[in-house]
Amino acid sequence: MFQATRRRLALWYTAITAVLLLLFACGVYLYVRNTLIERIDDTLNHVVEVVERSLVIEPVNVSVTSEAKQYRINIEASFRNNANTVEDDRIDIEWFSSTGDLLWSTFAEPINIPIDSNLNGETVRVVREEDGAGSWGDLEGREENKYEHQDFSPLILRQVTQRVEIGRQVLGYLRVSHPWFEVTKPSRQLIVDLALGTGLMVLSVAASGWFLSGKAMEPVHQSYQRLKQFTADASHELRSPIALIQTNVQVALADLESLEASETSTVTASHYRQQLQIVERLTQRLGKLVNDLLFLARQDSGIAQESFSLCPLDALLMEVVEEQQLFAAAKNIMLSLELIDPPATETNLELLENWFTLTGDWNQLVRLFTNLIGNALRYTRDRGHVNVELKRFEAIYRVSGFGYVTPQLQVKISDSGIGIPAESLPKLFDRFYRVDPARTHSSPDKATEKTTGSGLGLAIARAIVENHQGQIHVESVLEQGTTFTVVLPILASGE
């Protein structure tokens, strides 16, 4: 499924980019081609102006009045001799009489193209007739089968024609021609370059699209895998207490039926009370699991509503430790709380009074440290010890060469328990993850009691710490103990 989605993303990305590149290449081609044509037209118009200024105009009859004078162009004086040249990119000039007859030309062979006065420039296509005459003709005016046995050499020209006149007298027509290959040659090269560049770019975009779509799909794939695992684990955890509840209810109903059927039944009220107590414990376990799942779901979706306020963390830890003392006493475990006093150099009374106060959610912090201290007590041997340490320190962060001092609170919860294997530490905060059940549920020396934890306690602890913009770390050595370290900033936005 994810591979198909990745392919579709890459194909869409490549297709859209290819269309944009194609439009860009067409725009560049049209812009360059029009620019070349405009440059040629400007050159031709400039040549027309220069030649027109250099024309030698003389009267035909000097005896008549000025109103009736007739003028003509002195071709010998106005135009130089037509010299043969091998230059392909030269500009050719033609002079026509007022009736359209060719009088002078720089072409070695005449081009039979009708006169069309056009200063904007036009493109004409002519062919050379290889029939011995050696003349050029307009390709557009030919009949298709008239010269079917002749070979034609196409020639494309860009031409500008100017009518030369004095008053109402037309002296002739000046036509300037430029080879069209100065447009077609760079245009063809540009097409090749653009096609090659566009092709390489599309291939690069395809590779990049495949890579980027894979990167984009990674968090989706990971979230999907976590969701699958979460759903499977939640289903497993919910199925067990529900099945037990159903079994106990069925047994109670069966006993009730036997009691109603026989007056000598041995079923007593204490028996029903025991079964109902089992159902109650299972229901409480199920309710706790549902609450934990609901808490994590709200944290993941961002809809959890925290109530952040000033929380004296020392008072909070005192309450939690006091609540856990009963369980610690039952296992002969020494549970202690140590508060690291502020330095003697600190004289700010207001700061000293709020030395261990931070901004946070009281209920979430109580849940956090209740989970951590409860776990420490649960996995500590009888006559062991659990120590909770609270201190304040200044953390220095450097951003762009500037140092920022941020006050933070650190809580260390150390125990002398059975420890955690090193391979389990990276997964310890994963949801529904439990260390080896043979170690967590029972041990030969009764270091731990049989537990029914769902594996969500540490995941919830990490969610609460991250919600307070803090950090949580764990260090453990087998058969020596475990230390959880929680670092919380004094000021947390709660976002």
Image (tube, rainbow, N blue to C red):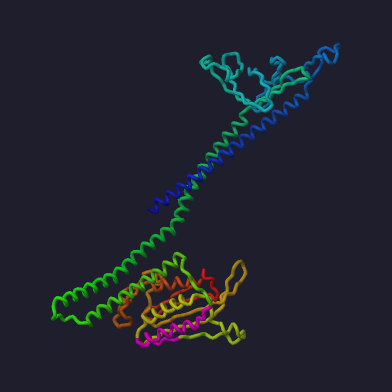
Q: Is residue 139 above or below residue 372?
A: above
Out of 263 and 68, give the one closest to the viewer. Answer: 263
Residue 203 part of the magenta-drawn span: no
The location of residue 170, given as percent across then percent down, is 75, 18
Q: Is residue 374 above or below residue 124?
A: below
* Residue at point 71%, 28% (across, down): 45
Out of 403 and 271, give the one closest to the viewer. Answer: 271
* Residue at point 65%, 28% (across, down): 89
The mark total stands at: 0
The location of residue 181, given as percent across then percent down, is 61, 29
Q: Is residue 263 above or below residue 157?
A: below
> In this rendering, would 329 be left or right of 412?
left
The dominant secondary structure in magenta is helix
The location of residue 184, given as percent across then percent down, is 59, 31
Q: Is residue 92 visible?
A: no
**Which segment did they paint magenta?**
310-336
> In this rendering, would 119 be left or right of 232?
right
Residue 318 part of the magenta-drawn span: yes
Q: Is residue 144 above or below residue 357?
A: above
Quarter where residue 171 is shown: top right
